[in-house]
Image (cartoon, grey):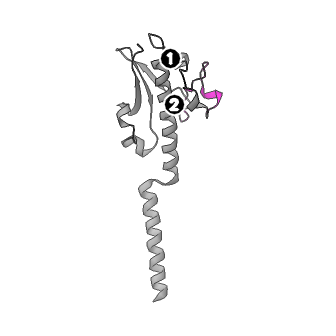
Amino acid sequence: MTRALMACGVATCAFAVGLGLYATGGPAEARKVRLDEQRYGDIREIGRALKCASVPLPETLDDVQPCGSALVSQQRRGPEARNVHGMVIIDPVTSEPYAYSRLADGGADICMAPQSHAWQTSPPYIVARLTRRDGLLCVRASAPA
């Protein structure tokens, strides 16, 4: 009887752990969430730099220059991810520059394709700051004043 109860307890614990990993996505999903957070930080900093840009906005991300403290949060990335002005513009997932498009109103969208399920469905705590376009999440930079 004791062995049967112990086996039942072990099976219940194993089931609970398995269910927890299934529900949260496990370590692989957590890595994707952290990577999406890093990428959001990159496109947010590009958006901030664009707000300080001269009118009109640059044609490409190669011409974006840092503004104020833009480089402080980007220190974790090496020179291979930066443009000539020191701004991180390379997406670590695609190894290509982040998607950038100028808008008719003079502003621009800087976009990333989310990798984690959580960011694909509803990005945490920042939904109001992002727009969705063709499966991408974008930071909108208004035209400089």
Q: State the predominant SS element of the stretch in magenta.
A: loop
Mark closest to the chain's N terminus, 2 or 1: 2
Residue 141: x percent and y percent?
Answer: 41, 22
What residue is at 53 percent from the left and 36 percent from the top? Answer: 93
Q: Quadrant of the N terminus?
A: bottom left
Under tag 2, what secondary structure?
helix
Image height of 142 relative to 2, above or below: above
* Residue furthest out toward the bottom: 1
Disc sitting over residue 42 in the figure:
2
Residue 107: x percent and y percent?
Answer: 39, 17
Image height of 64 relative to 72, above or below: above
Image height of 88 relative to 55, above or below: below
The image quarter containing residue 140 is top left
* Residue furthest out toward the top: 55
What residue is at 60 percent from the left and 25 percent from the top? Answer: 82
Q: Quadrant of the C terminus?
A: top left
Badge 2 vs badge 1, beta-carbon distance below 8 Å: no
Left or right side of 75 for 24: left
Residue 112: x percent and y percent?
Answer: 45, 32
Disc sitting over residue 51 in the figure:
none
Left or right side of 119 for 35: right
Image height of 24 relative to 83, above or below: below
- Specify few, some or many for label 1: CA neighbours under 10 Å numbering under 14, 14-19, or 20 or more: few
Q: Which residues are magenta?
A: 77-93
Callout 1 amino acid: Thr
Callout 2 amino acid: Asp
Q: Which residue is mark 1?
A: 60
Under tag 1, what secondary structure?
loop
Cα separation between marks 2 and 1: 15 Å
Mark nearest the camera among 2 and 1 is: 2
Left or right side of 133 for 88: right
